[in-house]
Image (spheres, grey):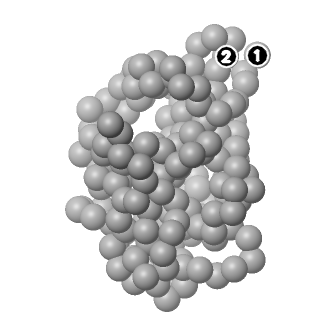
Amino acid sequence: MITIDREGANAHIEREKLLDRVMGPARFGKSSEILRRNRRPADGLAFVAFEDTHMIGTVRLWNISAGNAGAALLLGPLAVDKIYSGSGVGAGLVYAALNAAQASGHRSVLLVGDPQYYARFGFHAEPASNLLMPGDFDRHRFQAIQLGNEDVLSGSTGVLRATGAMIH
């Protein structure tokens, strides 16, 4: 049976092994990694999927500042073991993260990812069109979703900046 839940305090090693299997070392060179490096994920906004006791998926949200729009979240990385590709595990993780973010009062989430995949959740490029990631990034993969009814990103400018708690 597959379950999705908040990431536990001792999941770090198993999560890193999963990310190594799914994404390899290339994940450390991504622009999003600059915003995650040496930071903790946003409180209560890290999720994992298990089949029985085996971790098969992960996603985290990270506290950032989205230029002059202010506080926002960054989603990623989303990773699911390849044998579960197309099973809905990734979608379940994204929905869990977005629902928890909205319930916690967050107003927007940004990411760099496949536009076709993330469109089903409501992500699109327009709200992020005048924002920049630190480092190199693929503009057409840079997307955002606004949570709730308030339009907090349209017209915003500036470079995303990490604001989350540092790892000690």
Residue 127: give x, y in percent of width and height. Answer: 53, 77
Residue 99 in percent (x, y) is at 73, 52
**Res 1 label:** 1
- Please tell me whether residue 122 is drawn above or below residue 79 in the rendered image: below
Please name the amino acid that badge 2 sits on: Glu
Quarter of the rendering containing residue 51: top right
Tell me where residue 134 appears, x and y as whole percent.
Answer: 27, 64
Amino acid, disc 1: Met
Q: Residue at x 63, y 11 (%)?
A: 53
Q: Is residue 40 left or right of residue 5?
A: left
The residue nearer to you, when weighing 53 against 100, is 100
Specify whether residue 69 is in view.
yes
Q: Which residue is mark 2?
A: 51
Mark 1–mark 2 CB contact (< 8 Å): yes
**Residue 78 position (above or below residue 25):** below
Residue at 43% of width from left, 68% of height from top? 65
Q: For residue 130, which numbered disc appears in the image? A: none
Question: Helix or strand or loop: what does disc 1 sit on?
Answer: loop
As helix, strand or loop, the secondary structure at mark 2 comes to strand
The quadrant in which residue 139 appears is: bottom left
